[in-house]
Image (spheres, rainbow, N blue to C red):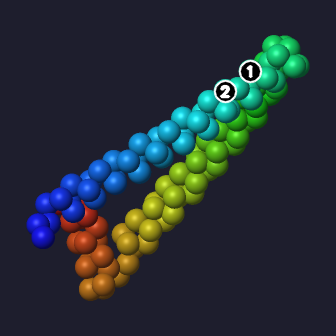
Amino acid sequence: MSRRPQRASKRKNHLVAELEAEITRLHQELANIYATLKQLEQGGADAFLTRRIAELEEGQRVARGQAVEAVVARSRAEAELRALEDAIGKAQGLSGWLLRRAQKRLRHP
């Protein structure tokens, strides 16, 4: 038997599987949209919008917290870098010279 039909059927099976996954995803999105519409119809637009605004504000607070944490982490990392550079600059002997030379090569390849 020739192998070409098997390869074609594998490609078709893969394509069919991808299409089925896409259909499943679209069905889920449609169900979510219907659920949102139902909430709007039952509770009114004001309640839905109030809840949505509260969710967005919570997300904004989380993002601000993460930004503050990132700034603090960056400051710590920069302080550690300065401390390491100072220690390398003050290192004595052959090992200090080797460290300074390696540092120069890292900065200016």
Q: Is residue 56 above or below residue 76?
A: above
6 horizontally vs 83: left or right: left
User: What residue do we see at 28% from left, 67% from top?
Assistant: 103
Using the rendered image of the protein, determine whether residue 68 is visible from the camera's viewpoint. no
Q: Report crowding for label 2: few under 14, some 14 to 19, many 20 or more residues within 10 A (C-alpha).
A: few
**Residue sitting at the far bottom:** 94
Quadrant where the N terminus sits is bottom left
Q: Secondary structure at mark 1?
A: helix
**Image quarter of residue 90:** bottom left
Residue 15 percent across, percent down from the top left: 33, 48
Residue 36 percent across, percent down from the top left: 74, 25
User: What residue do we see at 68% from left, 32% from top?
Assistant: 32
The Cα–Cα distance between marks 1 and 2, rounded to whole angstroms, is 6 Å
User: What residue do we see at 25% from left, 72% from top?
Assistant: 102
Q: Report crowding for label 1: few under 14, some 14 to 19, many 20 or more residues within 10 A (C-alpha).
A: some
Say whether marks 1 and 2 touch (CB < 8 Å): yes
Residue bearing mark 2 = 33
Residue 21 percent across, percent down from the top left: 48, 46
Residue bearing mark 1 = 37
Quadrant where the C terminus sits is bottom left
**Image quarter of residue 64:** top right
